[in-house]
Amino acid sequence: MYHGNGGFGQSLGGIMGVGEPATSVVEAAYQWFSLPRIAVETDLPRGTYDFIASGPNRGALKDEVKRKFGVVAHVEARETDVWSLQVKNPDILKPHISSGQNHVRRGDIVLFNASSANLAYLLENMMRERPILDRTGFTDEPVDRTKPAGRPTTIRRPSPKQTFDIRLKWDDGAEGQPHNVENLKTALLEQLGWELVPTRETIDVLVVEKAP
């Protein structure tokens, strides 16, 4: 267990974390990097943890999560509350024409040659309010889940039909404070011509439950 400031990342097929909560360890073990798409149905320990795994040892991290936390996880299709990212005004945002340095910070996102799916993913993991589904029509829809005999379930990620130079800035409050969803929604509409529409859809979630 660790009591400092945390963080984790991936590189060259490996992943490591320092001072991360138990939910982040589960994310890493199951390679499911979206907190709003995780349903925890049992108690997880408090405190923070260090971890590292690479190559064939990635499976060992699942075993360690089961041993230390007493939990396992599986993917399940569930109906849940989501944000649907849609186009409200198609005349504001123009297709990709320039280049520059990307940056992603709280309340400040700059992306060059990026898809609407890229933005949806970044906002989902930044805001951590609920899943954000790209329904702009600028990316192909993922195909239905398939499970050939003897093989694990696979999902094709959406591929871009069109990319953009995205500059999005909003007042999101101070670090450590709740994110300001209303300010984000206003900025999306005024700066990009897109909107977040609350709805319910059936999506895949990682269900974390007590180990048998």
Image (tube, grey):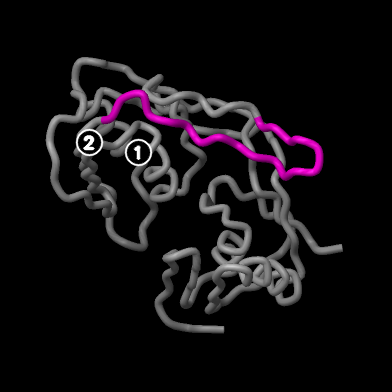
Q: Residues within 10 Å of mark 2 (few under 14, many from 20)?
A: many
- Label 2 to label 1, Cα distance in Å? 8 Å
196 to the left or right of 2: left
Q: Within the image, what quadrant is residue 165 found in?
A: top left
Marks 2 and 1, the one that precedes in the sequence: 1
In this rendered view, identify the residue nearer to me: 3 or 30: 30
Q: Within the image, what quadrant is residue 99 found in?
A: top left
Counting from the top left corner in percent of width and height, residue 78 is at 69, 35
Callout 2, which amino acid? Ile
Residue tagged by mark 1? Answer: 119
Residue 148 magenta-drawn? Answer: yes
Residue under the point 48% across and 73% down: 17
Residue under the point 26% across and 54% down: 105
Callout 1, which amino acid? Leu
Magenta segment, prevailing SS (helix, strand or loop): loop
In this rendered view, identify the residue nearer to me: 81 or 54: 54
In this rendered view, identify the residue nearer to me: 103 or 1: 103
Q: Mark 1 falls on what kind of element?
A: helix
Mark 2 touches mark 1? (CB < 8 Å): yes
29 to the left or right of 8: right
Q: Residues within 10 Å of mark 1 (few under 14, many from 20)?
A: some
Residue under the point 74% across and 69% down: 66
| 205 lies above or below 63 | above
Instruction: Magenta stretch: give its range.
Output: 145-163
Residue 93 magenta-drawn? Answer: no
Please give the label number shown on residue 166: 2
Q: Which residue ends up furthest to the right in the rendered image?
A: 212
Quadrant location of the C terminus in the rendered image: bottom right
| 82 lies above or below 50 | above
Quadrant location of the N terminus in the rendered image: bottom right
